[in-house]
Image (cartoon, rainbow, N blue to C red):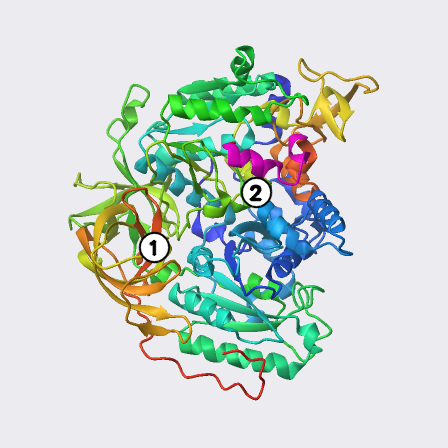
């Protein structure tokens, strides 16, 4: 794993201000190629010099064609800068308005990006709230190691709510299908009560899932932690209102408006270190429900499931027993950006068995207090 | 690590993020149009499309119902309606879009106000057979009130009027008339057929008489709403950053910065600024974004400003360009969109949130409510859910508000229930309601035109 990390760093010197030649290869065709959700030249825009970019734009994209834009303003935020600015504003506003917020940190890429934004929001002061991890007991060991390193590096206070403890003392029972993602809700709500957290930052994104697409950036939870999607607070302009009655709390999603591709482009741009399993590596895997599951203590092949050694990476990290790997040679951030841009499957569709249970699996979990 | 945004390198080529809201009446095909936009920009991935196809088949439909792409909640799918604003994301070669899909019928004011408050563009659906409906006028009234910079009217179901040019032109003319009357800055009409995709992504061969852009082309070309160059600098202070504790490195022990999101204009190192409401002046000596130092910052960047003098500034204060700074006031006249379940009455006490400051507010008078049938102000005793009214407020301490017409960020506020924290109203400082009923639109002999 260490070796892979080093290889990635060498291959991708994120601090280099020069255009990344690795990306330039992809834009060779003069016309944009539409693959998946994005055109290939679209994703190169932050890296290629502007005169080169102009040349790749199709002629009909010219705003002058309709006379609606006589003048290009000199100052405009790029997409990533606009998203970053919005997220930092949200994090600061909630930290200022609430007494005892906490940030959910799993070591997964979305919570890593959120944490990075929090560092920027308060720099040079330290992040003024603790981080909370709801530990399923089914974590990838490399993600736990990454979590601990990050907490140490940033001098954070880490609180852990352990699903395993709940199972050990009988407060929760293992599900028939073995997945522990839905079991996180009770330990999370108990931790919120125990620490009297009045706001919890989560790395949920609206593009992830259709119930999340309906979620506010600042979202009220009642005393049972329940989400009422039919009766949400209107969210107006950029004025966020986290006020609530005692016993209630808010969930705050600073990266609501980011897509998976935005997250990866930002990780690349900011050179944010991640757990190594996000990058291509060889692993013992077996196929189940169309996904590659890792061989590990909580995910053993059943009869007829053949273990193979394959080059894989993870698009999401969660409960090891139900989070699938994707076959991929992408070993650098740039390669992952290209791969995500061209993907025809959503990250959850590709890698999460628990979201396939029903059309409304996420909505049902969220209503009960899941993040 | 290069996280600096150099203004000249960031924006060119990439046309940035455009926020759009959609609105329309029931059954005018809005969800289908949104589904079509997502589908035709290849924003729907194969597993999402497979799920939509599966559900459509289960319901006995022959083709995938694209409306299912946006109706995400169980109740929405069960009832075939849209309940709450859904956010969707798509991108083209030149631009990325955040789309707020606002339902038309249930609590339309609440949803349209929510969607329009952040929108650069409102895409309003009109059924070509029905023309401008009351609902259309209401949506346009909200767009005018919230000052959405661009309005695009998609005249849908053009196939059901045999792609007739005269029908489109009639609708276009009545839209233009209503927009003018309500003060909508710009409203362009496009003939579309959302079901088949005509004039959505590509210009349609079935409307050869239409020479304008397809919907997506137009959205790609619209200029962004903010022209920071023309604005005067404003930044509400969200936090004062003073690093404390053992973990803070020696060089930052004396650090004192004012963190906030630039609400308007540009600020440069060396600029004189004034803190409001105190009126104390200082000079910007540093602009930080994370550990990077910037020569300047502009709206809507989130930054931290360092000043030359240690003046008294706390959360909620506004830093403004020294010249032309607004005068803090305790008396506000404003239009509010009432979103609370209980009525608003004169004499009520509430909280008002403006920028990063929350103060107590007292409702002095209710000066009228917008009659939604003929869109002018009439006297009223109270405001009910979804009403739009004009109020006079007295604040417990002075706040540097600006006219909403001058600055969307500087002139907007929330009214909040001090007991349970609920958001009760969206407010716009200095906005007015039309006082006389507008002239009726000539029906031009078409009885389908519902006025």
Mark 1 neighbour class, 10 Å CA radius: few under 14, some 14 to 19, many 20 or more:
many
Left or right: B342, with B395 as reference point: right
Residue at left offset 64%, top offset 21% = A175
Q: Secondary structure at mark 2?
A: loop
Mark 2 neighbour class, 10 Å CA radius: few under 14, some 14 to 19, many 20 or more:
many
Q: Is residue A363 magenta?
A: yes
The x, y position of residue A332, in whole percent, is: 63, 31
Residue at the outermost bottom position:
B445
Residue at left offset 43%, top offset 37% = A252
Q: Visible in this render: residue A240?
A: yes
Q: Secondary structure at mark 1?
A: strand
Q: Is residue A366 magenta?
A: yes
Residue at left offset 28%, top offset 71% = B379
Q: Visible in this render: residue A16?
A: no
The x, y position of residue A342, in whole percent, is: 69, 43
Q: Quadrant of the N terminus of chain A?
A: top right
The residue wearing badge 2 is: A211
The x, y position of residue A228, in whole percent, is: 48, 41
The x, y position of residue A19, in whole percent, is: 58, 42
Which quarter of the picture shows residue B202? bottom right
Left or right: A260, with A255 as reference point: right
> Toward the viewer: B270 or A77?
A77
Residue at the outermost right position:
A304
In the image, which residues are magenta? A353-369
The residue wearing badge 1 is: B425
Left or right: B301, with B252 as reference point: right
| B122 w.r.t. A294: above or below | below
């Amino acid at each position: 794993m260490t070796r892979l990390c080093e290889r990635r760093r060498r291959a991708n010197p994120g601090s280099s201000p020069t255009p990344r030649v690795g990306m330039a290869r992809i834009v060779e065709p003069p016309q944009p190629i539409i693959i998946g959700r994005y055109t290939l030249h679209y994703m190169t825009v932050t890296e290629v010099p502007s005169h080169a970019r102009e040349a790749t734009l199709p002629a009909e994209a010219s705003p002058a064609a309709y006379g609606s834009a006589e003048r290009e303003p000199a100052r405009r935020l790029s997409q990533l800068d606009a998203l970053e600015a919005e997220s930092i504003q949200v994090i600061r506003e909630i930290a200022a308005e609430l007494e005892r917020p906490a940030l959910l940190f799993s070591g997964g890429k979305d919570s890593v990006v959120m944490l990075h934004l929090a560092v920027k929001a308060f720099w040079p002061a330290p992040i003024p709230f603790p981080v909370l991890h709801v530990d399923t007991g089914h974590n990838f060991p490399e993600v736990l190691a990454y979590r601990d390193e990050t907490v140490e590096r940033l001098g954070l206070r880490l609180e852990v709510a352990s699903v395993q403890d709940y199972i050990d003392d009988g407060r929760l029972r293992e599900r028939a299908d073995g997945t522990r993602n839905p079991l996180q809700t009770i330990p999370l709500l108990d931790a919120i009560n125990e620490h009297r957290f009045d706001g919890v930052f989560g790395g949920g994104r609206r593009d992830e899932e259709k119930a999340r697409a309906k979620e506010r950036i600042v979202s009220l939870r009642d005393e049972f932690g329940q989400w009422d999607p039919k009766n949400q607070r209107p969210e107006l302009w950029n004025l966020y209102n986290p006020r609530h009655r005692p016993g209630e709390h808010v969930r705050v999603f600073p990266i609501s408006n980011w897509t998976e591709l935005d997250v990866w482009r930002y990780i690349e741009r900011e050179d944010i270190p991640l757990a190594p399993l996000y990058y291509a590596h060889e692993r013992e895997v077996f196929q189940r429900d169309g996904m590659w599951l890792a061989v590990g203590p909580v995910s053993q092949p059943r009869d007829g499931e053949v273990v193979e050694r394959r080059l894989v990476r993870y698009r999401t990290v969660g409960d090891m027993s139900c989070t699938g790997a994707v076959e991929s040679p992408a070993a650098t951030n740039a390669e992952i950006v290209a791969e995500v841009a061209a993907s025809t499957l959503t990250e959850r569709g590709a890698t999460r068995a628990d979201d396939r249970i029903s059309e409304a699996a996420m909505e049902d979990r969220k209503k009960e207090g899941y993040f | 690590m290069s996280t600096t945004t150099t203004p000249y390198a960031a924006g060119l080529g990439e046309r940035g993020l455009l926020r759009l809201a959609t609105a329309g009446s029931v059954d005018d095909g809005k969800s289908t149009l949104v589904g079509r936009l997502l589908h035709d920009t290849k924003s729907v991935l194969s597993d999402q499309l497979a799920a939509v196809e599966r559900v459509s088949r289960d319901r006995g439909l022959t083709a995938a119902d694209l409306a299912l792409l946006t109706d995400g909640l169980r109740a929405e799918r069960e009832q075939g309606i849209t309940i709450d604003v859904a956010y969707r994301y798509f991108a083209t070669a030149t631009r990325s879009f955040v789309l707020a899909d606002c339902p038309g019928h249930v609590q339309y004011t609440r949803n349209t106000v929510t969607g329009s408050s952040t929108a650069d563009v409102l895409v309003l659906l009109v059924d070509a057979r029905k023309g401008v409906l009351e609902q259309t006028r209401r949506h346009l009234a909200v767009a005018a009130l919230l000052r959405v910079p661009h309005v695009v009217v998609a005249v849908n179901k053009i196939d059901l009027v045999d792609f007739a040019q005269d029908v489109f032109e009639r609708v276009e003319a009545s839209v233009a008339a209503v927009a003018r009357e309500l003060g909508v800055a710009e409203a362009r009409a496009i003939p579309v057929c959302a079901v088949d995709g005509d004039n959505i992504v590509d210009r349609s061969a079935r409307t050869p008489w239409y020479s304008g852009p397809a919907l997506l082309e137009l959205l790609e070309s619209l200029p962004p709403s903010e022209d920071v160059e023309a604005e005067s600098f404003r930044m509400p202070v969200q936090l004062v950053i003073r690093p404390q504790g053992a973990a803070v490195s020696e060089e930052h022990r004396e650090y004192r910065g004012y963190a906030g999101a630039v609400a308007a204009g540009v600020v440069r190192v060396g600029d004189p600024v004034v803190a409001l409401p105190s009126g104390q002046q200082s000079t910007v000596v540093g602009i930080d974004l994370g550990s990077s130092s910037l020569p300047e910052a502009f709206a809507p960047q989130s930054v931290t400003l360092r000043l030359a003098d240690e003046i008294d500034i706390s959360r909620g204060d506004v830093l403004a360009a020294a010249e032309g700074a607004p005068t803090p006031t305790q008396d506000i006249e404003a239009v509010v969109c009432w979103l609370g379940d209980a009525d608003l009455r004169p004499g009520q006490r509430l909280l008002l949130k403006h920028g990063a400051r929350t103060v107590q507010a007292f409702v002095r008078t209710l000066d009228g409510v917008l009659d939604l049938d003929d869109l002018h102000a009439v006297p009223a005793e109270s405001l009910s859910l979804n009403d739009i009214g004009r109020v006079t407020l007295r604040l417990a301490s002075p706040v540097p508000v600006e006219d909403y017409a001058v600055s969307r960020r500087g002139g907007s506020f929330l009214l909040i229930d001090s007991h349970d924290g609920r958001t009760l109203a969206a407010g716009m400082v200095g906005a007015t309601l039309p006082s006389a009923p507008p002239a009726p639109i000539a029906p031009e002999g078409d009885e389908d035109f519902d006025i």
